[in-house]
Amino acid sequence: MNSSTSVESSFLHRLAKHITASGKWAAIRNQSQKDLNMSSFPHKKIEEWRFTDLRPITRTEFVPFDEAGVFPATDIEQYFIPESDRSRLVFINGNYHEKYSSIGGLGKGVTVGNLSDFEEHDSVSEYLNKLVNYDNDVFVHFNGLNFVDGAFIHLEKDAKAEAPIQVLNLYTDAKEPFISTPRLLVVAEEESDVTIIEDHIGLAGNTYLTIPVCEVKAKQGAHIHHVRIQRDSLSALHVSRPIAYVEKNSEYHSYTINLGAKLARNEPRVVQEDEEVDFTLDGLVLIDGEQVADTHSVMDHRFSHGESHQLHKVVVNGSAHSIFNGKIFVRKDAQKIDSFQENRNLLLSNDGLVNTKPQLEIFADDVLCSHGATIGQLDPEEVFYLQSRGMTEEKAKEVLTYAFALETIENMKVESVHKLLIEEVYRYTKANTVAKVTA
Amino acid sequence: MLEIKNLHAVVEGEDIEILKGVNLKVNKGEIHAIMGPNGSGKSTLAKVAAGHPEYEVTGGDILYDGESILELDPDERAHAGIFLAFQYPVEVPGVTNTTLLRESYNTIAASRGREELDPLEFDDYISDKLELVQMKRDFLDRSVNTGFSGGEKKRNEIFQMAVLQPKLSLLDETDSGLDIDALKIVSDGINKLHGDDDAVILITHYQRLLNYIEPDFVHVMIGGKIVKSGDKTLALKLEEQGYDWLEAHATVNGEAG
């Protein structure tokens, strides 16, 4: 146990001591406590973190949740999507709120609810905290020690969820910075089908750290469409660990929209568990001001006959900073893999910064992997073309930025989410227009 | 309608003068053709008139309806009724033809005191215009110029002209890259759109366009200046003799080069 001596205590280790046992999840808590004791808080000298300035997290004086003086959530109905009228789970600062939630509109074979009500469920025993695999990651371990509530979605064999399921994570204003540890477990049995809208929304402008951990299991022939929208407060810190395991003939399509947070670190991973799978890890990042958005993804092809797709689009304005590291692994015997990765960055300002690193590690010889990264500005010829058709320069830039971002939004199957994201893109481009005019 | 006076222009940030004192007067109801060899400044003249930010006017003036437009942004010139059909129309993925055109139509309509059209009204309005350039309806739902053939792009420019109803149209090599059938369609479109209240400036390399659109005046541009103006017979002479005789003329006067 030499490594334990080299672990430096961080604020997460200190805060861990204040967590009071809820009586739930004893085994996970014990394991997480042990793992946390063995894990250090990351820093820039570690390759995986070298572009990411973690000081916004380390310099914040987080207090135990009970001492944060959180205010109640108000006016939250505006965030309910109509399609999920009877399939909505609401968490406020990580705690489940039954009175805002609505479950039971999903038909036969679909179970949706608060994890802590399903401690004895077979799938919970089998998969919760077992799928999340991020090595010695303090964030995962802290979440494992701290979480009590969480979203649980289970589909029996052949079950089709009749409506999209909205998992709404709201964060309230507070007197002091606090930490929230949302949890999501999705288990889709053979040939089942579900659409999940996972939304993170900061209700005020306060500082908090949220560490969502999401585990997804797509069994044989299951189809999962997973939209993740991050609309945290602009002072918030967001570190998320969503991981999906895909079995034979299954499909997992994930679309992450990153709009908020001062610093967001997202590490989506997909692990292929058998042949004939199809998965997507698309992302859209729109950042401005001092925002930092960091995506470190892994697409792990372990078996033959897999198709994977990753389009990561980024718009950077102000002094914002985007980091992308997309790992594609193709293991030795994983032949006939067709993998596509593209990272396109649009820089709207002179002070924006983009670090991008596609990383392909291919050990099989019969695979088709394409990847590319581009960084560019709006084409002046395109701006002039639209201006010559009567649009103002601002409007032309807005339209072109929107067009750039649109490609990722087009895949949204849920109508209101599609509309919502179009509005968010317009709000982003509009805000930039205003900033430029007043500058 | 348009009066260009001793216009000088350089590429923004560079010292190379491309327009070296252009003079041109265009009245309502007229069609002018500007011809000339490659690199003579024809396209630059059109872009400068439309307000392209790549060029800086260093001398002279452009008057439109008696007012200088040099200080106007490209969109303000469009609002005033100036239209440039691009030599190389730009692809705008993600923005459909309909979206662009309705946005353009309504912005221009608003600034010229015409009534704005809602999507349904607009749909009716553009149906006729589609016929004018023989475009299919599905063309409207495609992203602007994205994946269009060269001919489709040029037809799209004339379609836009039909929809926006400009007062002054600058058509920059709209004929180049067109086969004979497409050339007829485009020419027919331009002829139908042209009337007593608007003016058209055709920029072209080839006399063949002028078989279909009859210009009132033909100008020859060489070395950043208009060196010769005449009626349509000038175009025929150029077809036969090329530009050499004019280049010699320009040099003798010590003005080109």
Image (cartoon, rainbow, N blue to C red):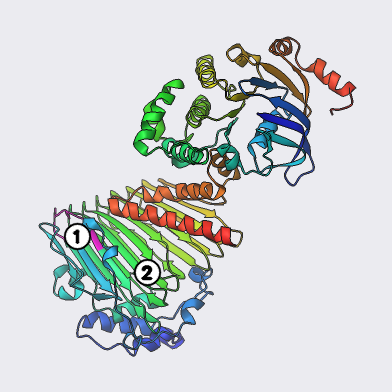
User: Residue A382 in magenta?
Assistant: no
The tally of labels here is 2
What residue do we see at 58% from left, 45% from top? A379
Residue A372 as seen in the image, left or right of residue B68 = left
Dot label at residue A52: none
Q: Find residue A212 and report its horizontal and vertical position in percent.
A: 33, 71
What residue do we see at 71% from left, 26% from top? B25
Residue B82 as seen in the image, left or right of residue B250 = left
Residue B176 as seen in the image, left or right of residue A251 = right
What residue do we see at 32% from left, 51% from top? A412
Q: Secondary structure at mark 2?
A: strand
Q: Find residue B72 and report its horizontal and vertical position in percent.
A: 64, 43
User: Residue A158 in magenta?
Assistant: yes
Callout 1, which amino acid? Answer: Asp
Disc 2 crowd rating (10 Å Cα; few below 14, some 14-19, many 20+) is: many
Callout 2, which amino acid? Answer: Ser
**Sequence-first tag of 1 and 2:** 1
Disc 1 crowd rating (10 Å Cα; few below 14, some 14-19, many 20+) is: some
Dot label at residue A85: 1
Q: Secondary structure at mark 1?
A: loop
Q: Find residue A314 and report its horizontal and vertical position in percent.
A: 48, 56
- State the residue position of label 2: A240
Quarter holding the C terminus of chain B is top right
Numbered disc 2: what chain? A
Against B193, residue B109 (above or below) is: below
Residue segment shown in magenta: A155-166
